[in-house]
């Protein structure tokens, strides 16, 4: 089961997460998500546990727990939504009174 952990202290590491969740069962992976430019924690993570019952118990017991001075949120991770890569609907006009100008706006034909 994939578990989402949020509101993490920026000091929490993959190894720390592994230790917290290992108390409830075998941890397949524990990954703090890092900013791709600064390589610093973004404050959330994903933990994968193979035993669903152990994962449910970990979620129940760790949700709302205090870790490194912060109250963490722990829940079942939702499946990642597919991204279109377009950044939204780009079919609309320029908005408002936008008028497209060409290089020949001052010349006559």
Image (tube, rainbow, N blue to C red):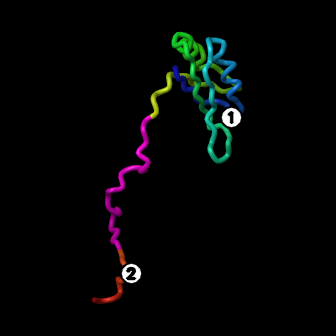
Q: Main secondary structure of the magenta part?
A: loop
Residue at 63% over, 32% down = 32
Extent of the magenta region: 81-100
Q: Position of residue 4 (x, y in %)?
A: 54, 26
Residue at 62% over, 12% down = 25
77 in magenta:
no
Q: Which mark is residue 103?
A: 2
| Residue 105 position by quadrant | bottom left
Against 101, is 10 above or below?
above
Instruction: Choose the circle earlier in sequence order: 1 or 2.
Output: 1
84 in magenta:
yes
Q: Quadrant of the C terminus?
A: bottom left
Q: Which mark is residue 68?
A: none
Q: Residues within 10 Å of mark 2 (few under 14, many from 20)?
A: few
Q: Nearer the viewer, residue 72 or 13?
A: 13
Q: Position of residue 50 (x, y in %)?
A: 55, 16
Q: Position of residue 10 (x, y in %)?
A: 68, 34
Q: Position of residue 85 (x, y in %)?
A: 44, 48
Residue at 30% over, 89% down = 108
| Residue 33 position by quadrant | top right
Against 84, is 51 above or below?
above
Q: Nearer the viewer, residue 21 or 98?
A: 21
Against 109, is 69 above or below?
above
Secondary structure under the numbered disc 2 in the rendered image: loop
Q: Which mark is residue 10?
A: 1
Contact (Cβ within 8 Å) of mark 1 with mark 2 = no
Secondary structure under the numbered disc 1 in the rendered image: loop
Q: Residue furthest left?
A: 109
Q: CA distance from mark 1 to mark 2?
A: 52 Å
């Amino acid at each position: 089961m994939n578990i989402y952990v949020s509101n993490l202290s920026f000091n929490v590491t993959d190894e720390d997460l592994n230790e917290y969740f290992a108390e409830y069962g075998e941890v397949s992976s524990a990954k703090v998500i890092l900013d791709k430019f600064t390589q610093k924690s973004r404050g959330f993570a994903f933990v994968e546990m193979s035993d669903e019952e152990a994962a449910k118990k970990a979620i129940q017991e760790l949700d709302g727990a205090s870790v490194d001075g912060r109250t963490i949120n722990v829940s079942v991770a939702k499946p990642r939504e597919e991204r279109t890569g377009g950044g939204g609907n780009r079919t609309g006009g320029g908005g408002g009174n936008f008028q497209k100008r060409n290089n020949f706006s001052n010349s006559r034909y």
